[in-house]
Image: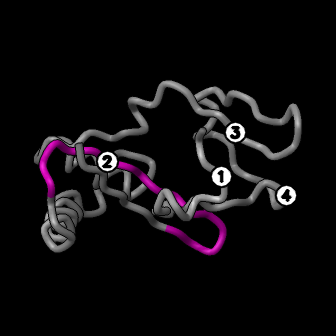
Amino acid sequence: MYFYELHESDDELFASVILAHDAEYDEQEFLDIVLEAQESIGKTFEEESLIEGIAAELERKHGFVEVEANLRAAVRVSAEEGETAITAVDERQATIPTEEEDFRTMLVEVEPEDRPYRDN
């Protein structure tokens, strides 16, 4: 399974959609089909955002699957004791972070020997 991301942002909000596909597309191939999907839907998409409209078109024409739709559990992890808790999946999308909760995610590949801790 291969994963692909569509994201858009403005001054206030960053949104992203994660898609999965059983075929591997290189960056240029993925860009080409995203541009094709964007041109196809124009400004007439029914979804709430452009990236959701493109994701729906990629699902219809190329068999991509939106990962979010298959999400079964979400956990907000905190370094503070007692603060790690389940977040209802349907509430997770509706939550708009306040300034105190504003955060971004980043995928970082770390070699096992570079981890600050190791499983024993």
Residue at (62, 37) in percent of width and height:
92
Give the Cα distance between marks 1 and 4. 28 Å
Disc on res. 100: 4
Give the Cα distance between marks 3 and 4. 14 Å
Of the residues under marks 3 and 4, which one precedes in the sequence? 3
Q: Which residue is mark 2?
A: 19
Q: Position of residue 57 (x, y in %)?
A: 21, 49
Rendered view: 36 above or below 53:
below
Q: Amino acid at mark 1?
A: Tyr
Q: Position of residue 120 (x, y in %)?
A: 60, 38
Of the residues under marks 3 and 2, which one precedes in the sequence? 2
Of the residues under marks 3 and 1, which one precedes in the sequence? 3
Give the Cα distance between marks 3 and 1. 21 Å
Of the residues under marks 2 and 4, which one precedes in the sequence? 2
Of the residues under marks 1 and 4, which one precedes in the sequence? 4
Task: Check the picture and name the quadrant holding the N terminus.
Answer: top left
**Is 96 placed left or right of 51 in the picture?**
right
**Is 11 placed left or right of 1 in the picture?**
right
Give the image quarter of residue 76: top right
Residue at (52, 58) in percent of width and height:
15
**Structural crowding at the residue carrying mark 3, measured as other residues with C-alpha within 10 Å and reported as few (<14), some (14–19) or many (≥20):** few
The boundaries of the magenta stretch are 9-24
**Structural crowding at the residue carrying mark 1, measured as other residues with C-alpha within 10 Å and reported as few (<14), some (14–19) or many (≥20):** few
Disc on res. 117: 1
